[in-house]
Amino acid sequence: MASSRTAAMLVLVAAVLCPAAFSKTSSAFISMPTDHVGGSIPPVSPAEGLAFDFHADSCPQLQDVVRSAVQTALQSEIALAAGLLRIFFHDCFPQGCDASVLLTGDGSELQLAPNLTLQPRALQLIESIRAMVHAACGPVVSCADITALATRDAVAFSGGQGYDVPLGRLDSLAPAPSSAVFNLPQASSNAATLIDVFQTRNLDNVDLVALSGGHTIGKGHCSSFSNRFSEDSGFVRSLASNCSTDFNRLQDLDVTTPDVFDNKYFTNLQEGKGVFTSDQKLTADWRTEWVVNGFAGNHWWFFGQFAASMTKLGNLQGPQGNVGEIRRNSCFVRNAQSILTTTSDEGLSASV
Ligand code: HEM
Ligand SMILES: *[C@@H]1O[C@H](CO)[C@@H](O)[C@H](O)[C@H]1NC(C)=O
Ligand SMILES: CC(=O)N[C@H]1CO[C@H](CO)[C@@H](O)[C@@H]1O
């Protein structure tokens, strides 16, 4: 496929220019390491309306612009990688990947509890990349596509595996309803609850465990795991004691390699060192425990499955399918609301 050949070429060029950043990921970008997996992971086809080469003609520079912008931003602030990954999850899970989470203003998803802890600088990074991409190609790429690509590049830059991202998403005209946003799973949930919630989005037990592996990078507030402070374990006592010193501190979600995208999250779980209830309980249910053990023992399986599960997450669409517009003035504002806009808003969503 043309787009993956182009992507592979870009990675090779980047790997020559910047070998340290790409040494762990360059070969993984080019092919799924199925020979290490012990059974292949079925390929995930793009959702209705999406295609890997959607922007091959309309914006040939797209992948290059996004990747170098993400790389530059992460080189100065690695925490943004986790910020991007969580924004992607919070965009896609409620009503499909439509950049609805990025809208600001009254009734926006950002005002709802689950979004209070999205990183403002990661949100801003997505908007900055949109401006760069639109400067290069015109307003032809959605904020939703840019979010998906930037997230993939952030995972790869952090040590994870790259994967091809189907493109062609449109940006929503409105925030998701709060009922959908509150479908986002809670950190106090046990595995049975998480299995049910993920099932409503056609994500199975293996997807649940793989995607929970997103917590191999990033941080959480004490309030997200204070429900556990009565638990009788040395690890939880250490969590609680650090929070009693400073309740506003940010806790590493992977206590072994906090900024590296690797499978240490799963070996931590095996040692009882998961930070949220929702993490640690994955070892307490037979439907998820075997997957935790599998990923802990074989990081290639985790990397390959994470890529496949992210593609499934990225395929989610709302009840009306892939409808909306390309936000062209800001990812934070839909076109009709933008004070910057002087021309009619119709055209674009219909023309692309
Ligand atoms: C399985 C259910 C999940 C639950 C209950 C959950 C819950 C949470 C909570 C409570 C936080 C910390 C918020 C805070 O205190 O600041 C968090 C952070 C994070 N989550 Fe999840 N999450 C889940 C799944 C996911 C998935 C599927 C991904 C992506 C694939 C993800 C990626 C992240 C990342 C990267 C962070 C760190 C963000 C940062 O450092 O800014 N989570 N999650
Ligand atoms: C608590 O803080 C100490 C000192 O900074 C640190 O060594 C320890 O790893 C922290 N505990 C957890 C669970 O992160
Ligand atoms: C990241 C972000 O924009 N968070 C917002 C969430 O909602 C609160 C309350 O409206 C805002 O103050 C935050 O800025």
Image (cartoon, grey):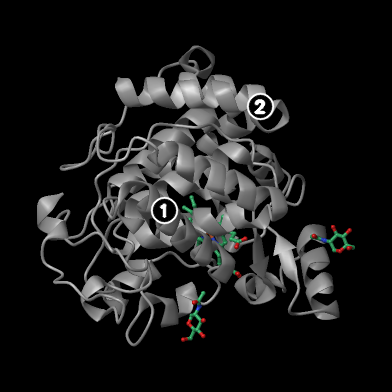
Q: Residue at x 43, y 64 (%)?
A: 185
Q: Is residue 197 above or below residue 178?
A: above
- Secondary structure category for the residue under label 1: helix
Query: Percent from the top left, x then y, of residue 222?
Result: 69, 74
Q: Is residue 57 above or below residue 335?
A: above
Mark in the foreground, 1 or 2: 2
Q: Residue at x 24, y 72 (%)?
A: 335
Query: Percent from the top left, x then y, of residue 184?
Result: 40, 66
Residue 288 appears anywhere in the view: no
Instruction: Check disc 1 and give the amino acid type.
Output: Thr
Circle count = 2
Check the picture and name the quadrant holding the N terminus.
Answer: top left
Instruction: Check disc 2 and give the amino acid type.
Output: Leu
Lower position in the chain sequence, tag 1 or tag 2: 2
In this view, the residue farthest toward the top is 35
Count neighbours of disc 1 (C-alpha within 10 A) and say few if under 14, some if 14 to 19, many if 20 or more: many
Q: Tell me if 115 is positioned left or right of 174 in this view.
A: right
221 or 328: nearer the viewer: 328
- Secondary structure category for the residue under label 2: helix
Residue 311 appears anywhere in the view: yes
In this figure, which residue is indicated by the disc labeled 2?
A: 17
Q: Tell me if 5 is positioned left or right of 45 in this view.
A: right
In this figure, which residue is indicated by the disc labeled 1?
A: 147
Query: Percent from the top left, x then y, of residue 306?
Result: 47, 37
Query: Percent from the top left, x then y, of residue 212?
Result: 52, 49
Q: Residue at x 39, y 32 (%)?
A: 164
93 or 206: nearer the viewer: 93
Q: CA distance from mark 1 to mark 2?
A: 25 Å
